[in-house]
Amino acid sequence: MYRAPDGTEYYVLDGHVHFWDGSPANQKNVYGKGFIECFYAYHSNLSPAEWVWPLDKFEKYDEGTMMRDLFEEGYVDKAIFQPTYLRDFYVNGFNTTEQDAVIAKKHPDRFILNGSFEPRDGEQGIRDLEALAAKYHVKGVKLYTAEWKGDSKGWKLTDPEAKRLLAKCQELDIKNIHVHKGPTIWPLNRDAFDVADIDDAATSFPELNFIVEHCGLPRLEDFCWIATQESNVYAGLAVAIPFIHSRPRYFAEVISELLFWVGEDKILFASDYAIWSPKWIVEKFVDFRLPDDIAKETGVTLGTDQKKKILGLNAARLYDVDVPVALRLREVAAV
Amino acid sequence: MTAVLDGVEAAVVAALDSVFDPELDESLLRLGFARAEVLAEGRVRVDLRLPTYWCAGNFAYLMADDARKAVAAVPGVRSVEVTLHDHFASKEVSSGVGRGGSFDDAFGDLSDGSGLEALRRLFWAKAFTMREEQLLRALVARGHTHEELAVMRLGDVTDGGELLARYVERRRRLDLPVDDDAPLAVMPNGRPIGAEELANWLRRARSTRISLEANTTLCLGLHATRYPDTAEVRR
């Protein structure tokens, strides 16, 4: 919970956190090294200087550091573990559900554990998802469509195998599908960040919620257009929200577009920890005021209610989290 | 780079300045992503360094190939060697472009065989949309109504300056008319935009501009983090 200087209290549900091992000992090849170094550049470039870690700490941090950064200092009430397997790049995987589960088990009131599925494993992929659901009762999966696997350099939500797995999610009551559109390599001659498959999947599976991480960036405009057509498409703010520190004008423009096209009920805060730490983001976001010219041009509002929804209430709704009455919106609390 | 460039060097720099990152709609030279060195006997070396290890290989190939062609066309240049550094597809791009082969040849099964032209046109259209929004927005700020914009011709824009020049350049790329009589406000396919549609079109075009600008900001930031010494070039 974050109490702003004006006394307003915000429930904080961080929609995207990691507990990864990107250390050299776990790197399988040059791609594993390239992957963590790419993350580190995002971290170094957009974090305030005092929040920049040395590379070795960033490659592998311990549980105590994470618990402190998220819950003791970072104002986070609950955080969603989003796995990123990358078994072709890392010996033990980069950040698997199993690794997250060890921590989540110790702090059951703090974490929501999400799983993943792998459409390129055929029947085994279905069985793995069933096992994951039975063991951890996950309510969501994180999908990284750019993940390499053998000769495959990525997949789409419209692949028949992916559709079978989405149908299985629906059957297993795994209703929150977090999609990370990284640079999908196949087919390499087409736009690697195309988000059109989300449109198709959202239409085919109306009971599922599709949370598009980093709000479709770098294809924000295509994402916004899809989200206006599909009522079950949401925007995750990872990557976009840290702009608030070094490029506040761009953050204002991006969040205004999202408020205009996607709407205040469908935007979810995410730090993407440990790429960024929630403390400074939450403080700056609550303090943030849209520049007058942008507010006037777009006609959107980013006030206390919108901030409360984005920081926690929207994600709480998707994950059936019981938010303390005092931290809900006033109208809702009165019901 | 020395203050006084000889003829070939100046022409090579100008050639590189004409090559754009298709995704960001900006010159490789101004982005700091490429630099050229003129060696002995008309040999030129072009080094390409992108914001991340994972930047899309297709755009990397387009930029490397465009740079090779632009520099090779400079009189006095006999050979060009383009090297893409620190990238997951460094080898495929550098050697593929060096052989002068097609993208599909360089990447084999990773391509669906239809080449890069559709991708190139898609991003020209996005760049067109951004530049049109920037120009029309400036005209609205000067007091033009949507009704006026919908009937204006290119020749009616006086004092359009750089914004007009940039917009006309992208119209040309999409094979759209650029004469004074051509309608000012058109879709990427050339269809004129009616007054009643213009507000909606501008709203969507604004998203395209913001997406491109945010992407450029992010890429420049990542590039500066990765290659601190090239930040100088951009200033």
Image (tube, coloured by chain):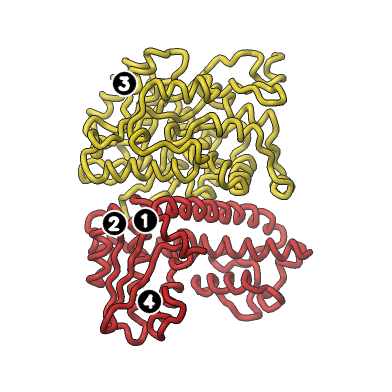
Chain colours: A yellow, B red
Measured as percent of width and height from the top left, residue B122 is found at 46, 61
Q: Are marks 3 and 4 in contact (CB under 8 Å)?
A: no
Circle 2 SS class: loop
- Residue at the spot of label 2: B112
Figure quadrant of residue A56? top left
State which tag comes first along the sequence, 4 or 2: 4
Relative horizontal placement of residue A35, taking residue A206 as reference (left or right) = left
Q: Dot 3: few (<14), some (14–19), or many (≥20) neighbours within 10 Å?
A: some
Camera-nearest label, 3 or 4: 4
- Residue at the spot of label 3: A132
- Residue at the spot of label 1: A190
Figure quadrant of residue A188? bottom left
Circle 1 SS class: loop
Q: Indicate the quadrant containing the C terminus of chain A: top left, top right, bottom left or bottom right.
A: top right
| Residue sitting nearer the eye, B192 or B139 | B139
Question: Is residue A192 something that shows in the picture?
Answer: yes
